Amino acid sequence: MGKNELTYRRRPLGFRLKKYRLLLPFVLIGVAYYFIFNYIPIIWGFMISLKDMKVGSTISNAPWVGLEHYRYVLNDPEMFKLLRNTLTISIARLVFTFFPPILLTIIIFDLRSTLFKKFGQTLVYIPHFFSWVIIYGIVFAFFSESGFINILIGKLGGNTYPFMTSSKAFVPLLVGSQVWKEAGWGTILYFAALTGVNPELYEAAKIDGAGPLARIRAVTLPAMIPVISFSLIMAMGNILNSDFEQILLFYNASVFDVADVIDTWVYRIGLGRMQYGVGSAVSMMKAVVSLVLILIANTASKKVAGRGMF
């Protein structure tokens, strides 16, 4: 710590607030936004999980039931299957969607043509802006009974396969469409990290005789490590959060045994049966588990990579 920084920290808080008084309104706006739209709903959600909310009742006048909703959730016989399906889908997503953006970033970043590089970036960003309804329509056009893939299989003399109603094909279709939709968008953070790399490092590596793979290992990957650590920590925190809209569109009665997850269960119970307290209880439990996973991942990242999110 420098002498000037130490002297500055010893000055009274009022002096520092006065120095940055022009920035304080913007900070207060950000604090107010998160407090109103994030922290207050968390408090209300926790209160609802402890009350018997009915249609027409309010948070204040609903009767208290304590931990009854939490006991109901933990004792529900479906919860083991829901947790298994949620973890299966989430872990498959984590494994198969985490690395494609990294590889895609490295491939596009190493392109020599600036014009082709910009074209490639734009091309891979486009699927992100499609809604899941459009993505499902594209998947259906390819993998339905009369879709392009089954037509091609038939022309080659094979037997058609019911991809859209197969329990075995459900998770691959889910993860594959997720990769196609979000892999390009996931490269943005990695490109931002690589723009700060000094080009002279690559030139020095070339002079030292480093080939393309050696330059990636010695220069590109070290520059991406902080963002990779951040992305992994955030992914661990979201491991119980399935993409509800995607699953709701993709699943059907034939794949219900592998497609029903915690979020769809909350949708059926919380909204379908109007058991708002039960839905809030599940949300609170997921939030606690996600917080614990983030703390564990952050601690592990500090020990392994030497840096964490906080």
Image (tube, rainbow, N blue to C red):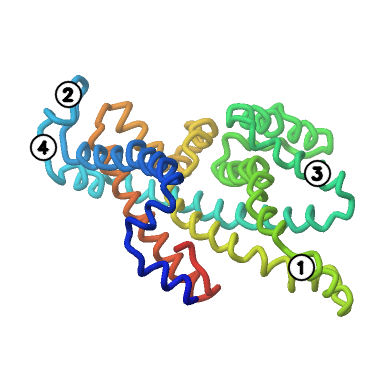
Write down the residue under mark 2: 57
Q: Residue at x 80, y 35 (%)?
A: 152
Looking at the image, is mark 4 or mark 3 earlier in the sequence? Answer: 4
Write down the residue under mark 3: 118
Looking at the image, is mark 2 or mark 4 earlier in the sequence? Answer: 2
Q: Amino acid at mark 1?
A: Ile
User: Which one is closest to the eye, mark 4 or mark 1?
Assistant: 1
User: Which one is closest to the eye, mark 4 or mark 3?
Assistant: 3
Q: Quarter-wise, where is residue 58 in the image? A: top left
Badge 1 element: helix
Q: Amino acid at mark 4?
A: Trp
Q: Amino acid at mark 3?
A: Lys
Instruction: Say left or right for 3 vs 172.
Output: left
Few, some or many C-alpha atoms within 10 Å of disc 1 (few <14, some 14-19, many ≥20)? some
Badge 4 element: loop
Few, some or many C-alpha atoms within 10 Å of disc 2 (few <14, some 14-19, many ≥20)? few
Q: Residue at x 10, y 32 (%)?
A: 63
Separation (CA) of disc 2 from disc 4: 12 Å
Write down the residue under mark 1: 216
Q: Residue at x 46, y 70 (%)?
A: 5
Write down the residue under mark 4: 64
Separation (CA) of disc 3 from disc 2: 54 Å
